[in-house]
Amino acid sequence: SDRLLFVAFPMLVVSFVAAIEWQSLFPTERDYRNLMPLPVSRMQMFLAKLTALMLFVLLFAAAVNFFPTFLVPMVQASSLALEPLRIKHFFGHFLAASAGALFAFLALVALQGALMNVLGRRLFPRVSLLVQSVLLLGLLTALPHVITVGDLYRRGGISREVMDWMPVFWFHAVYEMWIGRTVSPMPELAGRAWMGLGVAAAGTVLLYGVSYIRQAMVQAEAENRLPYPVVEAVLRRVFRWWLRSEKRFAIVSFVFKTLSRSRQHKLLLTAYLGIGLAVLVNLWVLDWLRVSAGRRMDLAQEELVHTALSAPLVMAFFFVSGLRLVFTIPITLQANWVFRLLEGESRVEWLDAVESAFYVLAVLPVLLVAPLFQLPLMGWYLLPGHVAICTLLMLILVELMLWEWQKVPFVCSYLPGRRNVALTFILYWFGFSLYGLAMTRFEVWGLRSLPRWLVLAGLLLAVLAKVRELRREMWGALPLKYEEEAERTVETLGLAG
């Protein structure tokens, strides 16, 4: 089971690398424009790019597996070991883990090559980001389960059918075969591993070559347009009717178009969403395991209801937090002079537009999917009360996130490392536990009767009104920030004036 864990982890890490670098795996339009005028043949370009790609993944796999290759066999060598420690244990670990990581990388490259050739030059740029986002969400969701897969394997909780279709068990069988465990089904699974690695490598080379010859992958002009003009026209009409201010509409449009065109910002927001989904999936899995175990069925089902009610709050916390971080990362600093010149008395309207963007991008989508978590367990009866409580809690979260906000999204420089990472993580985890999990206990208490619900809703409404009042007192009073500055070592009193 320990060897299985250390085969699965490098595969997951290298898959993360392939998903994050998804856009750079194949040559882009910029590569063609820069290299085609040079006296370099197309075959040389293809071999150079493919060689660089293979060296990259091999170096990364070697770095991930270097220390475990020596430490894991040494830790497993003890007086209770089935056989003494030998060189084959070190070599078997490195071979199986590196081969598994290489298979994961090549499989994703082959997938991208297949999509490029099937979808073509026009459709692939639109589908590419969706596939990349799905991969990141799936890998983030699978990350906690990698830790538990060894324990499930040790207890016999994984069937032979699962082993036949999960590549991680194939390369674990290579490990076991190399150190001398030839019991069934290890030989069959090890054969699948080498066959799968060969198919992935051949598919990568073939599809990579065909794609390289046929097309340049992405057109820069295609990325600078919203991919769905009909949706854009409908949203423009809705926002004009709702915002009722040309200045607010201009800022909201700027936020939406910038976010739709920037792959970096969308991926960062997807990562936050993936963390939220990973937390929810693992909560659901734990609850279902309690229910299926049949121990204290009443408590297990109650925890399952709590998880269903907390799902919108968990997603809202990570969505709003991610959106706030994405808004602080600039897109093109050289263009913020437009906002500097036009700020004037429009500051409050611009900031109000930022608030509206939070409502549309974070609050509204979560509220639309909230019934999907509750209806299978609780039906329609409690849905209106649940949605009302969630709405109030989400609005309070937005107010807290906008506390002391003094920026237009995407136009202020970003200075990383201003806060201690460990302290920030602890504070965010405490805030998440309080907001996403503890508040559900109060909601369950309020949903038991109408008077309780009225008391809870009244308290939340009062908190929302007070927080909003305090936030609006300084809203737009200070000039907007366009340059992020490091915190001063010595704070002065400012009495010279």
Image (cartoon, helix red, strand yellow):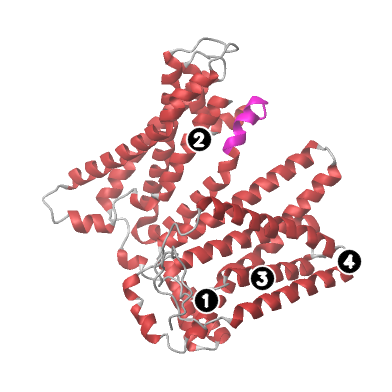
Q: Amino acid at mark 3?
A: Ile
- Residue at 60%, 12% in the rendered image: 80
Can you identify the residue that label 2 sits on?
9
Q: Which of disc 1 and disc 3 is earlier in sequence?
A: 1
The amino acid marked with disc number 4 is: Ser
Magenta run includes residue 158: no
Q: Secondary structure at mark 4?
A: loop
* x and y, in percent, of residue 222 in the image: 34, 66
Q: CA distance from mark 2 to mark 1?
A: 40 Å
Q: Nearer the viewer, mark 4 or mark 1?
A: 1
Mark 1 highlights which residue?
354
Near-viewer residue (62 or 38):
62
Q: Secondary structure at mark 3?
A: helix
Q: Which residue is mark 4?
A: 449
**Residue 239 position (above or below residue 197):** below
Per the model, the C-alpha gap separating discs 4 and 1 is 37 Å
- Residue 225, image x, y percentages: 38, 71
The part of the chain drawn in magenta is 146-157
Question: Going by the picture, which residue comes out furthest to the front?
Answer: 496
**Secondary structure of residue under mark 1:** helix
Given the image, on which type of amino acid does mark 1 rest? Val
Residue at horizontal 78 percent and vertical 57 percent from the top? 441
Q: What residue sits right under mark 3 in the picture?
A: 396
